[in-house]
Image (cartoon, rainbow, N blue to C red):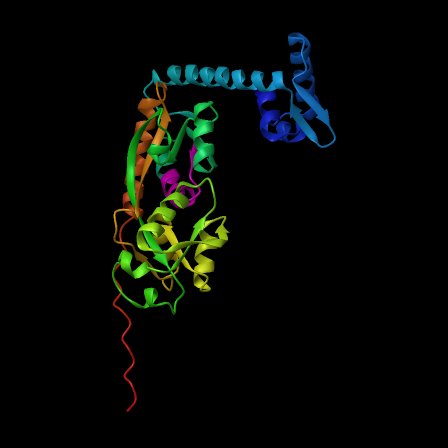
């Protein structure tokens, strides 16, 4: 079942074999044996790759459920010793993972040396799908997008504005009011990201508009475009503060409005036997986030140069 699911996920026998650390002939032989036993063709082979047949797609769906239940059984056995051990599959928003996980993983390894964690960055809609079908055990996301799951709040994020160095927003000090953004052009991520929906709502409330000419594929891309004067990048605070500490010349300002916030949670399937341990992991994520979200020291506004008489 693991072999069949791996081929479905990668679309190629070679890639599936590499993913599972087995030889390609061995993987192909095992899948052929499975097809013989079931009396059906699960995978269409071609030079361009491997495509699941309709019955193969249904087998993969059921195989994911069975494999998840097997992992759950192993987890129950491990939990009898009261330890957080074994492999956990974590999904995270790309606007969160790279900035929270480096510090969090170090702390998790210190506390739970037998814990192993695989991480995937996905859009919000993909995180929910993979959590529900068992490909992920827990996700760091916005709880409102996972209505049939359990969750614990990790932290609230305020949105920050980032503009070119010579933009009036960069030259002033303190928080930005919604009225300061009227008529401005916002830069945001593309479809499928929860952040893009929040930015759209914020733009409507501010009398601003979201750029239709540019949709960023990453927060770094948005920040760089803003630095070149293409618009105002709306960035979540975890990213904005981490990057601003790396580069003190980077000017970011918090937006003072209830719409300029989002709640980040740790989410897992309802009834998961991992729940107790996931909550332990959540406490670590929460503590690390609190430290990273410490506000930057306030910078005084730039003084205007005296006019020549």
**Is 178 one of the magenta-colored residues?**
no
Pick the residue in front: 299 or 19.
299
Residue 306 position in % (x across, y down): 27, 83
- Asked if residue 176 can be seen in this view, the reply is no
- Please give the name of the residue rendered at 39% of the width and 38% of the height, measured from the top-left corner: 105
Quadrant of the rendered image containing residue 97: top left
- In the rendered image of this protein, does residue 204 appear above or below residue 46? below
Position of the N terminus by quadrant: top right
- In the rendered image of this protein, does residue 194 appear above or below residue 87? below
Q: Is residue 180 left or right of residue 218?
A: left
- Asked if residue 129 can be seen in this view, the reply is yes
Residue 178 position in % (x across, y down): 28, 56
Pick the residue in front: 248 or 115.
248
Q: Is residue 139 left or right of residue 213?
A: left
* Direction bottom: furthest residue: 309
Residue 151 position in % (x across, y down): 31, 29
Pick the residue in front: 82 or 67.
67
Residue 269 position in % (x across, y down): 38, 23
Quadrant of the rendered image containing residue 8: top right
- Please give the name of the residue rendered at 38% of the width and 60% of the height, measured from the top-left corner: 184
Pick the residue in front: 61 or 80.
61
- Please give the name of the residue rendered at 67% of the width and 30% of the height, measured from the top-left corner: 14
- Please give the name of the residue rendered at 32% of the width and 59% of the height, measured from the top-left corner: 181
Q: In the image, which residues are magenta?
A: 90-106
* Direction right: furthest residue: 47
Q: How many marks?
A: 0
**Is 105 one of the magenta-colored residues?**
yes
């Amino acid at each position: 079942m693991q072999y069949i699911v791996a081929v479905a996920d990668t679309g190629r026998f070679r890639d599936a074999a590499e993913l599972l650390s087995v030889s390609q002939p061995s993987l192909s032989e095992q899948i052929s044996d499975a097809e013989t036993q079931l009396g059906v063709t699960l995978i269409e082979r071609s030079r361009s790759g491997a495509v699941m047949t309709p019955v193969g797609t249904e087998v993969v769906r059921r195989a994911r459920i069975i494999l998840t239940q097997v992992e759950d059984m192993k987890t129950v056995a491990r939990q009898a010793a009261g330890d957080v051990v074994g492999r956990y599959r974590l999904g995270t928003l790309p606007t969160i993972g790279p900035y929270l996980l480096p510090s969090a993983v170090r702390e998790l390894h210190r506390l739970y040396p037998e814990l192993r964690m695989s991480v995937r960055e996905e859009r919000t809609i993909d995180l929910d799908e993979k959590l529900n079908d068992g490909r992920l055990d827990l996700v760091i996301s916005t709880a409102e997008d996972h209505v049939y799951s359990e969750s614990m709040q990790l932290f609230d994020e305020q949105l920050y504005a980032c503009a070119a160095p010579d933009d009036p927003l960069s030259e002033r000090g303190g928080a930005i009011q919604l009225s300061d953004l009227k008529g401005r052009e916002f830069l945001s991520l593309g479809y499928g990201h929860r952040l893009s929906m929040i930015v759209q709502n914020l733009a409507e409330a501010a009398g601003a508009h979201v750029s239709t000419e540019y949709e960023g594929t990453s927060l770094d891309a948005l920040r760089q475009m803003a630095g070149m004067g293409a618009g105002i990048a709306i960035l979540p605070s975890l990213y904005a503060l981490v990057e601003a500490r790396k580069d003190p010349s980077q000017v970011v300002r918090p937006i003072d409005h209830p719409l300029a916030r989002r709640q980040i949670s740790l989410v897992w399937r309802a009834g998961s036997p991992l729940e107790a341990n996931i909550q332990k992991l959540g406490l670590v994520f929460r503590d690390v986030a609190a430290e990273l979200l410490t506000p930057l020291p306030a910078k005084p506004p730039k003084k205007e140069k005296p006019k020549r008489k």
